[in-house]
Image: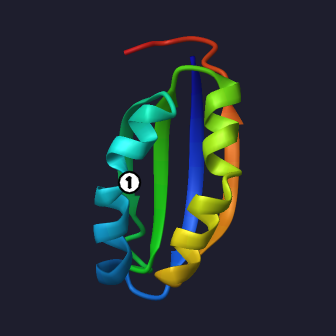
Amino acid sequence: MVYVLGKLKLESYDKWKPLFNERAAIRQDYGAYETHLFRNSDEPNEVVLLFKWDNFENAHRYFESEALEEALKNVGAKVIEVTYLDEIVKTI
């Protein structure tokens, strides 16, 4: 199990959001379990995503895919950061 933290800068949240929704099944095919979407309250065209993935290899394959890169480019989204995280401790 791996978590992926991603940060995107968008031309338009409203233009990007349908793409995000459409790619849900693709993410699942690559091994994604869940996604949490956060929007920067000071900058509405900046989003942070936290994904739970089955393993590092599948997550890396998805985030490095040309298809994702092209899809993001087409809606004016720029990846600022992608960080792969291993869960150490789960607490309340």
Where 65 falls versus 70 (above or below)?
A: above
- The percent position of residue 64, horizontal first and vertical second, equals 71, 51
Q: How many marks?
A: 1
Q: Quadrant of residue 72?
A: bottom right
Residue at horizontal 57 percent and vertical 16 percent from the top: 1
Q: Nearer the viewer, residue 25 or 3?
A: 25
Observer-nearest of 20 and 90 = 20
**Colour mapping used in the image:** rainbow
Closer to us: 61 or 17: 61
For the residue carrying disc 1, how many other residues have a C-alpha within 10 Å: few (<14), some (14-19), or many (20+)? few
- Furthest residue toward bottom: 11
Residue under the point 68% across and 26% down = 56
Q: In the image, what residue occupies the spot 48% across and 88% down? A: 11
Is label 1 in a helix, a strand or a loop?
A: loop
Quadrant the C terminus occupies: top left
On the rendered structure, is 52 left or right of 21?
right
Amino acid marked by disc 1: Arg
**Mark 1 — residue?**
23
Image location of residue 3, percent across then percent down: 57, 31
Position above or below: 59 against 24: above
Question: Which residue: 59% across, 60% down?
Answer: 67
In the image, taking residue 62 as reference, residue 21 lies left or right, namely left
